[in-house]
Image (tube, grey):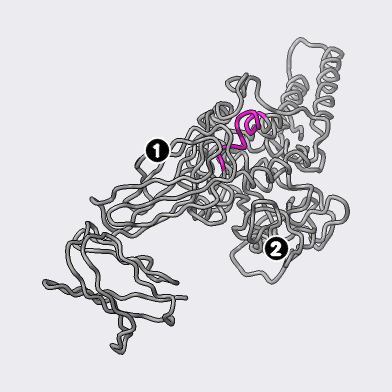
Amino acid sequence: MEVQRGKCRFYTLDYRFSRLFFNLSYICFFLNVKSKYSPMRKMIVFLSFFLLSVISFGQLVVGADSISHRTGRPNAEPPGYYDAAAGLNCAALKTALRDIITTGMTPQTYGALWTQYLISDIKPREVGPGSSANVIWDIYSDNPSGPDPYNFTPGPVASGGQQDNGTAVSGEGQLYNREHSVPQSWFGASASPSSIGPESDYFHIFPTDKEVNANRGNFIYGSVGTPSITSLNGGKLGPNNWPGLSGTAFEPINEYKGDLARAFLYFVTRYQSNMAGWQTLNPEGNKAFDGTTWPSVELPYLQLMLQWHNTDVVSQKEMDRNDAGYVFQGNRNPYIDHPEFVGQVWSPSCGLLLPADITFFTATYQQHNVLLHWNIDRADGLQGFDVERSLDGGRSFQLAGTVNWLNGVNDYSFKDNVSGFEGMVLYRLRVTDINLVYKYSRTVSVLLPSRANLFVVYPNPSSGKVKISFRVTNTTYWQVMLTDLSGRIVQSANWQPGQSIYNLPVEHLSNGVYVLQLKSAGESKRISIVIQQ
Protein backbone atom coordinates (compact mmCIF):
# COMPACT_ATOMS: atom_id res chain seq x y z
CA MET A 1 0.00 0.00 0.00
CA GLU A 2 1.18 3.52 -0.78
CA VAL A 3 -0.28 6.52 1.10
CA GLN A 4 -0.21 9.75 -0.90
CA ARG A 5 -1.81 13.02 0.27
CA GLY A 6 -5.23 11.81 1.21
CA LYS A 7 -5.46 8.71 -1.02
CA CYS A 8 -4.43 5.07 -0.92
CA ARG A 9 -2.94 3.15 -3.86
CA PHE A 10 -2.89 -0.65 -3.87
CA TYR A 11 -0.77 -2.96 -6.00
CA THR A 12 -2.69 -6.24 -6.25
CA LEU A 13 -0.52 -9.35 -6.46
CA ASP A 14 -3.23 -11.93 -5.96
CA TYR A 15 -7.03 -12.17 -6.00
CA ARG A 16 -7.04 -13.50 -2.43
CA PHE A 17 -5.81 -10.19 -0.99
CA SER A 18 -9.33 -8.78 -1.24
CA ARG A 19 -10.03 -9.20 2.47
CA LEU A 20 -6.73 -7.58 3.36
CA PHE A 21 -7.33 -4.64 1.03
CA PHE A 22 -10.87 -4.25 2.38
CA ASN A 23 -9.49 -3.73 5.88
CA LEU A 24 -6.66 -1.49 4.73
CA SER A 25 -9.11 0.67 2.86
CA TYR A 26 -10.73 1.53 6.16
CA ILE A 27 -7.36 2.50 7.54
CA CYS A 28 -6.88 4.86 4.62
CA PHE A 29 -10.34 6.29 5.18
CA PHE A 30 -9.73 7.10 8.80
CA LEU A 31 -6.27 8.44 8.08
CA ASN A 32 -7.69 10.97 5.68
CA VAL A 33 -11.17 11.65 7.07
CA LYS A 34 -11.77 15.31 7.99
CA SER A 35 -14.48 15.11 10.59
CA LYS A 36 -15.28 15.51 14.26
CA TYR A 37 -13.24 12.43 15.25
CA SER A 38 -10.47 13.22 17.67
CA PRO A 39 -6.84 12.23 16.95
CA MET A 40 -7.02 9.65 19.79
CA ARG A 41 -10.21 8.09 18.43
CA LYS A 42 -8.67 7.99 14.97
CA MET A 43 -5.65 6.17 16.41
CA ILE A 44 -7.82 3.57 18.18
CA VAL A 45 -9.79 2.87 15.02
CA PHE A 46 -6.58 2.70 13.01
CA LEU A 47 -5.01 0.18 15.35
CA SER A 48 -8.18 -1.94 15.40
CA PHE A 49 -8.36 -2.23 11.64
CA PHE A 50 -4.61 -2.71 11.40
CA LEU A 51 -4.91 -5.71 13.74
CA LEU A 52 -7.70 -7.19 11.60
CA SER A 53 -5.54 -6.69 8.55
CA VAL A 54 -2.58 -8.46 10.13
CA ILE A 55 -4.85 -11.39 11.00
CA SER A 56 -6.14 -11.49 7.43
CA PHE A 57 -2.62 -11.31 6.07
CA GLY A 58 -1.53 -14.15 8.32
CA GLN A 59 -4.38 -16.31 7.08
CA LEU A 60 -3.45 -15.59 3.49
CA VAL A 61 0.32 -16.07 3.90
CA VAL A 62 1.46 -14.64 0.61
CA GLY A 63 4.58 -12.58 1.09
CA ALA A 64 6.90 -13.01 -1.85
CA ASP A 65 5.58 -16.50 -2.53
CA SER A 66 3.05 -17.51 -5.13
CA ILE A 67 -0.56 -18.51 -4.74
CA SER A 68 0.64 -22.07 -4.21
CA HIS A 69 2.47 -21.42 -0.98
CA ARG A 70 -0.28 -20.58 1.47
CA THR A 71 -0.58 -22.69 4.59
CA GLY A 72 -3.37 -23.17 7.04
CA ARG A 73 -5.97 -21.68 4.68
CA PRO A 74 -9.34 -23.44 4.41
CA ASN A 75 -10.70 -24.54 1.07
CA ALA A 76 -12.33 -21.63 -0.77
CA GLU A 77 -15.30 -23.66 -2.00
CA PRO A 78 -18.32 -21.33 -2.24
CA PRO A 79 -21.08 -22.09 0.31
CA GLY A 80 -23.71 -24.39 -1.16
CA TYR A 81 -21.71 -25.05 -4.32
CA TYR A 82 -22.29 -28.83 -4.18
CA ASP A 83 -25.74 -28.85 -2.56
CA ALA A 84 -27.31 -30.38 -5.68
CA ALA A 85 -25.07 -33.45 -5.27
CA ALA A 86 -26.10 -34.19 -1.69
CA GLY A 87 -27.24 -37.78 -1.08
CA LEU A 88 -26.32 -39.01 -4.57
CA ASN A 89 -23.82 -41.62 -5.73
CA CYS A 90 -22.76 -43.57 -8.82
CA ALA A 91 -23.93 -42.25 -12.19
CA ALA A 92 -26.44 -39.83 -10.64
CA LEU A 93 -23.72 -38.15 -8.58
CA LYS A 94 -21.43 -37.88 -11.61
CA THR A 95 -24.15 -36.23 -13.66
CA ALA A 96 -25.01 -33.84 -10.83
CA LEU A 97 -21.35 -32.85 -10.55
CA ARG A 98 -21.24 -32.35 -14.31
CA ASP A 99 -24.19 -29.97 -14.08
CA ILE A 100 -22.61 -28.08 -11.17
CA ILE A 101 -19.24 -27.54 -12.81
CA THR A 102 -20.78 -26.68 -16.18
CA THR A 103 -23.16 -24.05 -14.80
CA GLY A 104 -21.32 -20.77 -14.47
CA MET A 105 -18.25 -21.93 -16.35
CA THR A 106 -16.93 -19.27 -18.71
CA PRO A 107 -14.32 -20.96 -20.92
CA GLN A 108 -11.23 -18.87 -21.45
CA THR A 109 -9.02 -18.90 -24.52
CA TYR A 110 -6.09 -21.20 -24.97
CA GLY A 111 -3.82 -18.17 -25.15
CA ALA A 112 -5.10 -16.90 -21.79
CA LEU A 113 -3.49 -19.89 -20.09
CA TRP A 114 -0.07 -18.26 -20.48
CA THR A 115 -1.14 -15.32 -18.31
CA GLN A 116 -2.93 -17.51 -15.80
CA TYR A 117 0.19 -19.62 -15.30
CA LEU A 118 2.04 -16.49 -14.15
CA ILE A 119 -0.54 -16.12 -11.36
CA SER A 120 -1.30 -19.63 -10.17
CA ASP A 121 1.43 -21.98 -11.42
CA ILE A 122 4.54 -20.48 -9.86
CA LYS A 123 6.73 -21.25 -6.87
CA PRO A 124 9.99 -19.87 -5.40
CA ARG A 125 13.11 -20.38 -7.48
CA GLU A 126 15.46 -23.15 -6.39
CA VAL A 127 18.16 -23.13 -9.05
CA GLY A 128 19.52 -20.81 -11.76
CA PRO A 129 20.26 -19.44 -14.22
CA GLY A 130 17.62 -16.73 -14.02
CA SER A 131 16.94 -13.76 -11.81
CA SER A 132 13.19 -14.09 -11.18
CA ALA A 133 12.24 -14.88 -7.58
CA ASN A 134 9.42 -17.15 -8.73
CA VAL A 135 9.52 -19.83 -11.42
CA ILE A 136 7.01 -21.95 -13.29
CA TRP A 137 5.75 -24.89 -11.23
CA ASP A 138 6.37 -27.71 -13.73
CA ILE A 139 5.14 -31.11 -12.54
CA TYR A 140 7.39 -32.84 -15.08
CA SER A 141 10.59 -31.33 -13.67
CA ASP A 142 9.80 -30.43 -10.05
CA ASN A 143 11.71 -32.49 -7.50
CA PRO A 144 9.83 -32.37 -4.17
CA SER A 145 12.53 -34.31 -2.30
CA GLY A 146 15.57 -32.29 -3.43
CA PRO A 147 16.82 -29.52 -5.71
CA ASP A 148 15.03 -29.18 -9.01
CA PRO A 149 17.13 -30.15 -12.03
CA TYR A 150 16.28 -26.75 -13.54
CA ASN A 151 13.75 -23.94 -13.19
CA PHE A 152 11.81 -21.99 -15.81
CA THR A 153 11.71 -18.21 -15.76
CA PRO A 154 8.06 -17.20 -16.26
CA GLY A 155 6.89 -15.18 -19.23
CA PRO A 156 7.64 -14.77 -22.94
CA VAL A 157 11.16 -15.19 -24.29
CA ALA A 158 11.12 -11.59 -25.50
CA SER A 159 10.73 -10.49 -21.87
CA GLY A 160 13.46 -12.80 -20.58
CA GLY A 161 11.17 -15.75 -19.84
CA GLN A 162 11.12 -19.29 -21.18
CA GLN A 163 7.54 -19.58 -22.44
CA ASP A 164 7.32 -21.71 -25.59
CA ASN A 165 7.66 -19.53 -28.68
CA GLY A 166 7.47 -22.31 -31.24
CA THR A 167 11.18 -22.94 -31.63
CA ALA A 168 12.59 -26.45 -31.39
CA VAL A 169 14.33 -27.69 -28.26
CA SER A 170 17.16 -30.17 -27.97
CA GLY A 171 16.65 -31.25 -24.38
CA GLU A 172 15.00 -30.43 -21.09
CA GLY A 173 15.02 -27.07 -19.32
CA GLN A 174 14.85 -24.87 -22.42
CA LEU A 175 11.15 -23.94 -22.81
CA TYR A 176 7.91 -24.66 -21.01
CA ASN A 177 4.60 -25.14 -22.78
CA ARG A 178 1.01 -26.29 -22.15
CA GLU A 179 0.53 -29.98 -21.43
CA HIS A 180 -2.94 -31.38 -22.05
CA SER A 181 -2.93 -34.17 -19.48
CA VAL A 182 -5.87 -35.50 -21.54
CA PRO A 183 -4.26 -35.21 -25.00
CA GLN A 184 -5.99 -33.15 -27.65
CA SER A 185 -6.01 -36.02 -30.15
CA TRP A 186 -8.20 -37.99 -27.75
CA PHE A 187 -11.01 -35.48 -28.20
CA GLY A 188 -10.28 -34.21 -31.71
CA ALA A 189 -9.05 -30.74 -30.79
CA SER A 190 -6.38 -28.57 -32.35
CA ALA A 191 -5.84 -25.70 -29.96
CA SER A 192 -5.05 -22.24 -31.28
CA PRO A 193 -4.65 -19.13 -29.10
CA SER A 194 -8.34 -18.28 -29.61
CA SER A 195 -9.66 -21.81 -28.93
CA ILE A 196 -12.07 -22.35 -26.06
CA GLY A 197 -13.56 -25.55 -24.66
CA PRO A 198 -11.85 -28.73 -23.52
CA GLU A 199 -8.74 -27.70 -25.45
CA SER A 200 -8.39 -24.65 -23.15
CA ASP A 201 -9.80 -26.03 -19.88
CA TYR A 202 -7.34 -24.98 -17.18
CA PHE A 203 -8.08 -27.91 -14.89
CA HIS A 204 -6.39 -30.49 -17.10
CA ILE A 205 -3.74 -28.32 -18.79
CA PHE A 206 -0.49 -27.84 -16.89
CA PRO A 207 2.67 -25.87 -17.67
CA THR A 208 5.41 -28.42 -18.34
CA ASP A 209 8.81 -28.83 -19.93
CA LYS A 210 8.46 -28.86 -23.72
CA GLU A 211 10.82 -31.80 -24.23
CA VAL A 212 9.13 -34.03 -21.66
CA ASN A 213 5.70 -33.03 -22.96
CA ALA A 214 6.76 -34.07 -26.47
CA ASN A 215 8.10 -37.39 -25.17
CA ARG A 216 4.80 -38.11 -23.42
CA GLY A 217 2.95 -37.27 -26.66
CA ASN A 218 -0.57 -38.67 -26.64
CA PHE A 219 0.31 -41.87 -24.77
CA ILE A 220 -1.80 -42.87 -21.80
CA TYR A 221 -0.44 -42.68 -18.28
CA GLY A 222 0.62 -45.98 -16.81
CA SER A 223 3.13 -48.02 -14.86
CA VAL A 224 6.54 -48.24 -16.53
CA GLY A 225 9.08 -50.78 -15.32
CA THR A 226 11.77 -50.58 -18.02
CA PRO A 227 11.73 -47.01 -19.37
CA SER A 228 13.20 -46.06 -22.71
CA ILE A 229 13.34 -42.41 -21.59
CA THR A 230 13.63 -41.06 -18.04
CA SER A 231 13.20 -37.34 -17.42
CA LEU A 232 15.51 -35.48 -15.07
CA ASN A 233 12.96 -35.53 -12.25
CA GLY A 234 12.23 -39.25 -12.68
CA GLY A 235 9.25 -39.35 -15.06
CA LYS A 236 9.36 -42.49 -17.22
CA LEU A 237 8.31 -43.35 -20.77
CA GLY A 238 8.22 -46.98 -21.84
CA PRO A 239 6.21 -50.23 -22.01
CA ASN A 240 3.07 -50.15 -19.88
CA ASN A 241 2.92 -52.98 -17.36
CA TRP A 242 -0.34 -51.97 -15.68
CA PRO A 243 -2.74 -54.98 -15.78
CA GLY A 244 -5.15 -54.76 -18.69
CA LEU A 245 -3.19 -52.05 -20.51
CA SER A 246 -0.51 -52.36 -23.17
CA GLY A 247 1.68 -50.31 -25.45
CA THR A 248 3.72 -47.28 -24.43
CA ALA A 249 2.86 -45.18 -21.39
CA PHE A 250 4.19 -42.23 -19.41
CA GLU A 251 4.54 -42.50 -15.65
CA PRO A 252 4.99 -39.22 -13.72
CA ILE A 253 6.64 -39.11 -10.31
CA ASN A 254 4.54 -40.22 -7.35
CA GLU A 255 4.00 -36.70 -6.01
CA TYR A 256 1.88 -35.69 -9.01
CA LYS A 257 0.02 -38.89 -9.83
CA GLY A 258 -2.99 -37.85 -7.77
CA ASP A 259 -3.02 -34.39 -9.39
CA LEU A 260 -3.18 -35.95 -12.85
CA ALA A 261 -5.74 -38.59 -11.83
CA ARG A 262 -8.09 -35.97 -10.42
CA ALA A 263 -7.60 -33.83 -13.53
CA PHE A 264 -8.59 -36.81 -15.68
CA LEU A 265 -11.62 -37.65 -13.54
CA TYR A 266 -12.68 -33.99 -13.74
CA PHE A 267 -12.40 -34.17 -17.53
CA VAL A 268 -14.58 -37.28 -17.95
CA THR A 269 -17.13 -35.70 -15.61
CA ARG A 270 -17.24 -32.22 -17.16
CA TYR A 271 -17.39 -33.67 -20.69
CA GLN A 272 -19.23 -36.93 -20.01
CA SER A 273 -21.79 -36.23 -22.76
CA ASN A 274 -18.96 -36.29 -25.31
CA MET A 275 -17.55 -39.67 -24.33
CA ALA A 276 -19.42 -41.70 -26.95
CA GLY A 277 -18.09 -39.53 -29.77
CA TRP A 278 -14.55 -39.32 -28.41
CA GLN A 279 -13.99 -42.96 -27.49
CA THR A 280 -12.58 -44.13 -30.82
CA LEU A 281 -11.00 -40.92 -32.12
CA ASN A 282 -7.54 -42.11 -31.08
CA PRO A 283 -6.26 -45.61 -30.18
CA GLU A 284 -4.62 -44.26 -27.03
CA GLY A 285 -7.76 -42.44 -25.96
CA ASN A 286 -9.73 -45.61 -26.58
CA LYS A 287 -7.69 -47.28 -23.83
CA ALA A 288 -8.91 -44.62 -21.41
CA PHE A 289 -12.44 -43.66 -22.56
CA ASP A 290 -15.17 -46.31 -22.65
CA GLY A 291 -17.78 -44.30 -24.56
CA THR A 292 -20.35 -44.02 -21.74
CA THR A 293 -21.56 -41.20 -19.51
CA TRP A 294 -20.82 -43.51 -16.60
CA PRO A 295 -18.33 -44.81 -15.74
CA SER A 296 -16.77 -43.09 -18.84
CA VAL A 297 -13.44 -44.85 -18.22
CA GLU A 298 -12.22 -48.28 -19.27
CA LEU A 299 -11.89 -50.43 -16.16
CA PRO A 300 -8.08 -50.99 -16.26
CA TYR A 301 -7.44 -47.26 -16.71
CA LEU A 302 -10.00 -46.41 -14.05
CA GLN A 303 -8.26 -48.75 -11.62
CA LEU A 304 -4.99 -46.94 -12.33
CA MET A 305 -6.57 -43.52 -11.79
CA LEU A 306 -8.24 -44.66 -8.56
CA GLN A 307 -4.95 -46.00 -7.22
CA TRP A 308 -3.17 -42.73 -8.00
CA HIS A 309 -6.01 -40.76 -6.42
CA ASN A 310 -5.87 -42.82 -3.24
CA THR A 311 -2.10 -42.94 -2.81
CA ASP A 312 -1.33 -39.29 -3.66
CA VAL A 313 -3.80 -37.26 -1.62
CA VAL A 314 -4.91 -33.72 -2.41
CA SER A 315 -2.13 -31.22 -1.78
CA GLN A 316 -2.15 -27.54 -0.93
CA LYS A 317 -0.90 -26.89 -4.46
CA GLU A 318 -4.02 -28.52 -5.89
CA MET A 319 -6.35 -26.61 -3.58
CA ASP A 320 -4.71 -23.34 -4.50
CA ARG A 321 -4.86 -24.14 -8.20
CA ASN A 322 -8.52 -25.13 -7.83
CA ASP A 323 -9.30 -21.75 -6.26
CA ALA A 324 -7.42 -20.01 -9.06
CA GLY A 325 -9.30 -21.98 -11.70
CA TYR A 326 -12.58 -20.89 -10.13
CA VAL A 327 -11.58 -17.25 -10.51
CA PHE A 328 -10.20 -17.86 -14.01
CA GLN A 329 -13.05 -19.82 -15.62
CA GLY A 330 -15.87 -19.95 -13.07
CA ASN A 331 -15.95 -23.61 -12.09
CA ARG A 332 -14.07 -26.05 -9.86
CA ASN A 333 -12.70 -29.59 -9.77
CA PRO A 334 -15.06 -31.40 -7.37
CA TYR A 335 -12.56 -34.20 -6.74
CA ILE A 336 -10.14 -31.71 -5.20
CA ASP A 337 -12.79 -30.04 -3.05
CA HIS A 338 -14.27 -33.40 -2.03
CA PRO A 339 -11.91 -36.34 -2.65
CA GLU A 340 -14.60 -38.63 -1.24
CA PHE A 341 -16.68 -37.97 -4.36
CA VAL A 342 -14.30 -40.23 -6.32
CA GLY A 343 -15.20 -43.27 -4.25
CA GLN A 344 -18.89 -42.38 -4.35
CA VAL A 345 -18.99 -41.97 -8.14
CA TRP A 346 -16.85 -45.00 -9.00
CA SER A 347 -17.89 -47.46 -6.32
CA PRO A 348 -18.05 -51.26 -6.64
CA SER A 349 -21.53 -50.99 -5.13
CA CYS A 350 -22.58 -49.23 -8.35
CA GLY A 351 -21.84 -52.36 -10.40
CA LEU A 352 -18.47 -51.01 -11.40
CA LEU A 353 -16.97 -54.37 -12.34
CA LEU A 354 -19.77 -54.91 -14.83
CA PRO A 355 -20.54 -55.20 -17.67
CA ALA A 356 -18.53 -58.22 -18.67
CA ASP A 357 -15.32 -58.14 -20.65
CA ILE A 358 -15.71 -59.28 -24.26
CA THR A 359 -12.77 -61.50 -25.16
CA PHE A 360 -13.47 -61.52 -28.91
CA PHE A 361 -16.07 -60.16 -31.32
CA THR A 362 -16.23 -61.07 -35.04
CA ALA A 363 -18.51 -60.40 -38.01
CA THR A 364 -18.74 -62.64 -41.10
CA TYR A 365 -20.89 -62.29 -44.19
CA GLN A 366 -22.75 -65.47 -45.18
CA GLN A 367 -25.15 -65.35 -48.08
CA HIS A 368 -27.42 -62.38 -47.28
CA ASN A 369 -26.71 -62.42 -43.54
CA VAL A 370 -23.96 -61.18 -41.25
CA LEU A 371 -23.13 -63.64 -38.49
CA LEU A 372 -21.86 -61.95 -35.33
CA HIS A 373 -20.03 -64.03 -32.75
CA TRP A 374 -18.67 -62.96 -29.37
CA ASN A 375 -17.42 -64.41 -26.11
CA ILE A 376 -17.34 -63.03 -22.56
CA ASP A 377 -14.94 -64.16 -19.86
CA ARG A 378 -16.97 -63.22 -16.76
CA ALA A 379 -20.44 -61.99 -15.97
CA ASP A 380 -22.70 -61.64 -12.97
CA GLY A 381 -26.06 -59.98 -13.34
CA LEU A 382 -26.07 -58.88 -16.96
CA GLN A 383 -29.27 -57.76 -18.62
CA GLY A 384 -28.15 -58.51 -22.15
CA PHE A 385 -26.53 -57.33 -25.37
CA ASP A 386 -27.78 -54.73 -27.84
CA VAL A 387 -26.41 -55.29 -31.34
CA GLU A 388 -25.94 -51.93 -33.05
CA ARG A 389 -25.30 -51.42 -36.77
CA SER A 390 -23.86 -48.43 -38.67
CA LEU A 391 -24.24 -47.85 -42.39
CA ASP A 392 -22.48 -44.46 -42.46
CA GLY A 393 -18.96 -45.33 -41.34
CA GLY A 394 -19.68 -45.11 -37.61
CA ARG A 395 -21.20 -41.62 -37.51
CA SER A 396 -24.47 -43.11 -36.22
CA PHE A 397 -25.61 -46.53 -35.01
CA GLN A 398 -29.06 -48.14 -35.04
CA LEU A 399 -30.33 -51.10 -33.04
CA ALA A 400 -30.16 -54.29 -35.13
CA GLY A 401 -31.38 -56.65 -32.41
CA THR A 402 -30.92 -57.85 -28.83
CA VAL A 403 -29.52 -60.99 -27.25
CA ASN A 404 -30.34 -61.96 -23.69
CA TRP A 405 -27.64 -62.90 -21.22
CA LEU A 406 -27.80 -66.45 -19.90
CA ASN A 407 -26.22 -67.26 -16.55
CA GLY A 408 -23.18 -69.49 -17.09
CA VAL A 409 -23.09 -69.01 -20.86
CA ASN A 410 -20.07 -67.19 -22.30
CA ASP A 411 -20.52 -67.76 -26.05
CA TYR A 412 -23.11 -65.79 -28.04
CA SER A 413 -24.08 -65.16 -31.67
CA PHE A 414 -26.52 -63.08 -33.67
CA LYS A 415 -27.58 -63.25 -37.33
CA ASP A 416 -28.38 -59.95 -39.04
CA ASN A 417 -30.29 -60.02 -42.32
CA VAL A 418 -28.53 -57.55 -44.63
CA SER A 419 -30.18 -58.42 -47.94
CA GLY A 420 -31.23 -54.80 -48.31
CA PHE A 421 -27.76 -53.35 -47.65
CA GLU A 422 -24.46 -53.10 -49.49
CA GLY A 423 -20.98 -51.71 -48.88
CA MET A 424 -19.23 -51.40 -45.51
CA VAL A 425 -21.26 -52.13 -42.38
CA LEU A 426 -19.99 -51.59 -38.83
CA TYR A 427 -21.20 -53.40 -35.72
CA ARG A 428 -20.75 -52.88 -32.00
CA LEU A 429 -22.26 -54.39 -28.87
CA ARG A 430 -23.78 -52.41 -26.04
CA VAL A 431 -23.47 -54.62 -22.96
CA THR A 432 -25.86 -53.68 -20.16
CA ASP A 433 -26.04 -54.98 -16.60
CA ILE A 434 -29.09 -55.25 -14.32
CA ASN A 435 -28.31 -51.79 -12.89
CA LEU A 436 -28.56 -50.37 -16.45
CA VAL A 437 -24.84 -49.65 -16.47
CA TYR A 438 -23.53 -50.23 -19.96
CA LYS A 439 -20.34 -50.24 -22.00
CA TYR A 440 -19.57 -50.65 -25.70
CA SER A 441 -17.47 -53.32 -27.35
CA ARG A 442 -14.91 -52.53 -29.98
CA THR A 443 -16.28 -51.97 -33.48
CA VAL A 444 -16.00 -54.64 -36.19
CA SER A 445 -16.69 -54.22 -39.89
CA VAL A 446 -17.81 -56.40 -42.78
CA LEU A 447 -17.97 -55.56 -46.49
CA LEU A 448 -21.26 -56.52 -48.15
CA PRO A 449 -21.41 -57.19 -51.88
CA SER A 450 -23.21 -54.79 -54.16
CA ARG A 451 -26.83 -55.80 -54.69
CA ALA A 452 -25.91 -56.04 -58.37
CA ASN A 453 -23.35 -58.77 -57.59
CA LEU A 454 -24.35 -62.41 -57.60
CA PHE A 455 -21.92 -63.52 -54.89
CA VAL A 456 -19.21 -62.38 -52.53
CA VAL A 457 -15.79 -63.93 -51.89
CA TYR A 458 -14.44 -63.92 -48.33
CA PRO A 459 -12.07 -63.65 -46.67
CA ASN A 460 -10.07 -61.81 -49.30
CA PRO A 461 -7.12 -61.68 -48.74
CA SER A 462 -7.16 -65.24 -47.41
CA SER A 463 -4.67 -67.30 -45.42
CA GLY A 464 -6.11 -70.75 -45.98
CA LYS A 465 -9.66 -71.21 -47.19
CA VAL A 466 -11.92 -69.08 -49.38
CA LYS A 467 -15.71 -69.14 -49.34
CA ILE A 468 -17.94 -68.02 -52.20
CA SER A 469 -21.32 -66.96 -50.84
CA PHE A 470 -24.22 -66.38 -53.22
CA ARG A 471 -26.75 -63.73 -52.22
CA VAL A 472 -29.53 -66.26 -52.77
CA THR A 473 -29.47 -70.04 -53.20
CA ASN A 474 -27.59 -70.90 -56.37
CA THR A 475 -29.74 -72.42 -59.16
CA THR A 476 -27.02 -72.75 -61.80
CA TYR A 477 -24.34 -75.30 -62.70
CA TRP A 478 -20.90 -73.58 -62.64
CA GLN A 479 -17.49 -74.48 -64.02
CA VAL A 480 -14.83 -73.09 -61.69
CA MET A 481 -11.19 -72.32 -62.49
CA LEU A 482 -8.56 -70.63 -60.34
CA THR A 483 -5.56 -69.36 -62.36
CA ASP A 484 -2.39 -67.51 -61.54
CA LEU A 485 -1.53 -64.26 -63.29
CA SER A 486 0.19 -66.12 -66.14
CA GLY A 487 -3.09 -67.92 -66.91
CA ARG A 488 -1.98 -71.32 -65.55
CA ILE A 489 -4.86 -73.27 -63.99
CA VAL A 490 -3.98 -74.13 -60.40
CA GLN A 491 -7.37 -75.48 -59.33
CA SER A 492 -10.69 -76.41 -60.95
CA ALA A 493 -14.11 -77.69 -59.83
CA ASN A 494 -17.74 -78.08 -60.86
CA TRP A 495 -20.40 -76.59 -58.56
CA GLN A 496 -23.86 -78.09 -58.56
CA PRO A 497 -26.91 -75.92 -57.88
CA GLY A 498 -28.80 -76.02 -54.59
CA GLN A 499 -26.22 -74.41 -52.30
CA SER A 500 -25.55 -70.84 -51.20
CA ILE A 501 -21.95 -71.26 -49.94
CA TYR A 502 -19.09 -73.09 -51.70
CA ASN A 503 -15.61 -73.73 -50.31
CA LEU A 504 -12.42 -73.13 -52.28
CA PRO A 505 -9.37 -74.63 -50.54
CA VAL A 506 -6.23 -72.58 -51.13
CA GLU A 507 -3.90 -73.83 -48.38
CA HIS A 508 -1.53 -75.37 -50.92
CA LEU A 509 -1.06 -72.20 -52.95
CA SER A 510 1.84 -69.78 -52.71
CA ASN A 511 1.30 -66.19 -51.71
CA GLY A 512 0.18 -64.00 -54.57
CA VAL A 513 -2.74 -62.82 -56.67
CA TYR A 514 -5.01 -65.32 -58.44
CA VAL A 515 -8.05 -65.03 -60.69
CA LEU A 516 -11.26 -66.94 -59.92
CA GLN A 517 -13.37 -67.64 -63.03
CA LEU A 518 -16.95 -68.94 -62.87
CA LYS A 519 -18.71 -69.99 -66.09
CA SER A 520 -22.25 -71.17 -66.65
CA ALA A 521 -24.43 -71.57 -69.72
CA GLY A 522 -25.53 -67.98 -69.60
CA GLU A 523 -22.78 -65.90 -67.96
CA SER A 524 -19.18 -65.65 -66.81
CA LYS A 525 -17.72 -64.07 -63.65
CA ARG A 526 -14.14 -63.14 -62.74
CA ILE A 527 -12.72 -61.91 -59.46
CA SER A 528 -9.19 -61.52 -58.08
CA ILE A 529 -8.19 -63.36 -54.90
CA VAL A 530 -5.14 -62.52 -52.78
CA ILE A 531 -3.42 -65.35 -50.88
CA GLN A 532 -1.39 -64.36 -47.80
CA GLN A 533 -0.32 -67.49 -45.93
Circle 2 crowding by C-alpha within 10 Å: few under 14, some 14–19, many from 20: many
Q: Answer yes or no: do the residues labelled 2 and 1 have beta carbons within 8 Å?
A: no
Residue 166 is situated, as x and y percent measured from the top left of the image, at: 59, 65
For residue 402, the mark is 1
Q: Is residue 273 left or right of residue 89?
A: left
**Residue 36 located within the stretch drawn in magenta:** no
Circle 1 crowding by C-alpha within 10 Å: few under 14, some 14–19, many from 20: some
**Residue 348 located within the stretch drawn in magenta:** yes
Q: Is residue 288 left or right of residue 251?
A: left
Residue 498 is situated, as x and y percent measured from the top left of the image, at: 22, 60
The first of marks 2 and 1 along the sequence is 2
Q: Quadrant of the N terminus?
A: top right
Q: Amino acid at mark 2?
A: Gly
Label 1 element class:
strand
Q: Which residue is mark 2?
A: 238
Q: What is the distance, in whole Å, between disc 2 and disc 1 at their CAs?
A: 41 Å
Q: Nearer the viewer, residue 426 or 503?
A: 503
Q: Quadrant of residue 268?
A: top right
Q: Is residue 355 left or right of residue 304?
A: left
Give the main secondary structure of the magenta stretch: loop
Q: At 37% across and 44% down in the image, what residue appears?
A: 397
Q: Amino acid at mark 1?
A: Thr
Residue 347 is situated, as x and y percent measured from the top left of the image, at: 65, 31
Residues in magenta, as a range: 344-356
